[in-house]
Amino acid sequence: MRAAVFRGTGRLETEEWPRPSIGPGELLLRLRGCGLCGSDIAKMLTPTSAAPAVFGHEIVGDVVEIGAGVADFAPGDRVVAAHHVPCGDCHYCRRGSHSMCPAFKTSHLDPGGFAEYVRVPAPNVRHATFKIPPPVSDEAASFIEPVGCCLRAVRRADVAAGDTAVVVGLGSIGHLFVPLLQRAGATVVGVDDAVHRIDFAERLGLEALRPPAARGRIATLSEGRGADHVIVTGGAASVLAWAVGVVRDGGSIHYFAGGHGDALPIALDTLYQRELTITATYSSSPADLAESSRLITGGEIAVARLYTHRVSIERLGEGVDLMRRRDAVKVYVTP
Ligand SMILES: [Zn+2]
Ligand SMILES: [Zn+2]
């Protein structure tokens, strides 16, 4: 089968890759499409990433083969399957740290979504594979994974009705946070330093501002207190000083992305005296993916409009460049 193969830092080649064969409890999917995620791009640019490899984890595909013992799926089903699943039973899982479960990262799709076929391992089939009903588009369905991650972040940030929330970074993840924070009852302001991203957000009906203007707006919305939550989806450590300036005393700053900066620039005394909370979310859990699937297949949140560009596997490198230049909000990749 054809796949977009990572051959070391920044290099992608379209190559033949062995088509996976499945065992008991597993599924073979023929890919319909796969979202290109910022984390895929980060791996492509990290010198220590193992090569060769096939990335892509926001997949939607058709079941073409089922392994012995699979009862819930049949050939012809259109499904979304999560890349990683936790064991559900260990100390980490019982305390809600699902993505820290030792089983989580070892349970991955084979080889990845930028290929023609994917093997879904048995635990992923059992705990995090979802049938997609006919009216839902492939592109909307491919958002189940990233929306699941954002739902988990909203839960971990403990957003409540009446809160003011600021989303820093208006890429696709920033846009996914907006309706989820609104569902939790928050008033949301989006912030980005790129004018074309502000324009895009405004076309979708979101209040979006550049950082200097946002500061005043946040003060007005919160009666001068500052935001209850600042959700950082991009900009890494350098955003923290700005976030500390707009969050209220006792408020929280939530990192949804890693990135440059090996230390967070905040004075310990500020953290302590102002009783600030810094949290982070890495990936999702099966329960969040299930809720995400319900929201998206039920049409409760509009997501597919975030795809601004579509490329084939052969042109994945162009999709990566579009997102790195921030010309694309989100890129959909098809075999
Ligand atoms: Zn992703
Ligand atoms: Zn576990």
Image (spheres, rainbow, N blue to C red):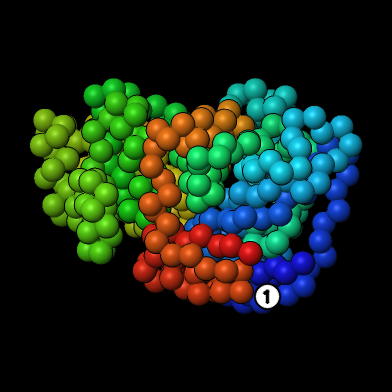
Which of 81/207 is in front? 81
Q: What's the amino acid at mark 1?
A: Thr
Label 1: how many Cα within 10 Å (few below 14, some 14–19, many 20+): some
Q: Is residue 152 visible?
A: no
Q: On the rendered image, what quadrant is the C terminus found in?
A: bottom right
Q: Quadrant of residue 76?
A: top right
Which of 286/217 is in front? 286
Identify the residue shown where x is 66% and y is 77%: 13
Identify the residue shown where x is 74% and y is 35%: 73
**Left or right, 73 with reference to 333:** right
Per the image, the residue denoted by label 1 is 14
**Left or right, 37 with reference to 168:** right
Position in image of residue 8 (x %, y %):
66, 74
Name above or below for residue 3 compared with residue 92.
below
Position in image of residue 105 (x %, y %):
70, 45
How many numbered circles does the render carry? 1
**Left or right, 22 with reference to 286:** right
Position in image of residue 291 (x %, y %):
52, 29
Identify the residue shown where x is 50% and y is 51%: 139
**Left or right, 124 with reference to 38:** right
